[in-house]
Amino acid sequence: MEKNNITNGVSAWMKSNVVCISLVMVFVVLYLITSVRPAVFAGLATCDIEYLNHEYYRWVTAVFLHFNLQHIFFNSLALLAAGSLLSPLIGRMKTLLLFVLCGALAEVVYSFIVNNGMGNYGAGSSGGIFALIAALMVCFLRYPNDFSGKWYRPDTIIVILFFVFANDNIGSFMTHLFGFTIGIIISFLMVQFRLIKAKK
């Protein structure tokens, strides 16, 4: 009976978090491709606006790229944790929308502000992940009853640790800040226009 409960729990988690699981699979496939063909990475990563050459698609594609195994592991872990908390509250498609839109907008700001006179290629999903964390905070402040009993869950602990310790350099900090700020704004607007509602 206990084994069935665990199986059912894992199945339910995977169903509610299928968007973030799919995103992680995309991360892994792209990482394998760019490891074998670094030119693909250079063609998809974002960069300073003066080097962008009107290739605006980079702002989106950069969100799915990672530099190394450590980068992809911790971002994937944090995405799965944030998604497992947020997706049941706002739905899978809104979680995907927030991740991609806010992550891409964070890369836009990065291109304009983080300018050091070099190509400075940037990539990573953490801007989108910080946007999901921002959405979690907005939802918690607006609908605190939907979060009862979740403080000691492993996914909550992972999200908190990622939020505190992921800023290991100035480039990461700036991207995280941009993603978090944009996530606050967009998720607040979604709550105000009732695109995000309390659970029934």
Image (spheres, grey):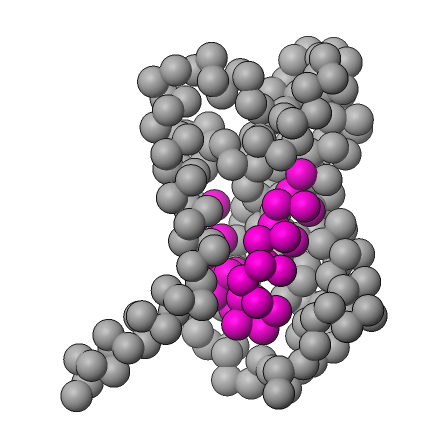
In magenta stretch: residue 88: yes
Which quadrant does the N terminus fall into? bottom left
In magenta stretch: residue 65: no
Most foreground residue, 86 or 196 = 196
Q: State left or right for residue 77 relative to residue 8.
A: right
Q: State left or right for residue 189 relative to residue 4.
A: right
Q: Residue at x 81, y 62 (%)?
A: 189
Q: Residue at x 44, y 74 (%)?
A: 153
The number of callouts visible is 0
* Rendered position, 63 above or below 40: below
Is residue 195 among the parts visible in the rendering? yes
Secondary structure character of the magenta stretch overall: helix
* Rendered position, 188 above or below 38: below
User: Percent from the top left, x then y, of residue 170?
Assistant: 66, 33
Q: Residue at x 69, y 47 (%)?
A: 102
Q: Which residues are magenta?
A: 75-104
Q: Residue at x 54, y 62 (%)?
A: 92
User: Percent from the top left, x then y, of residue 187?
Assistant: 73, 61
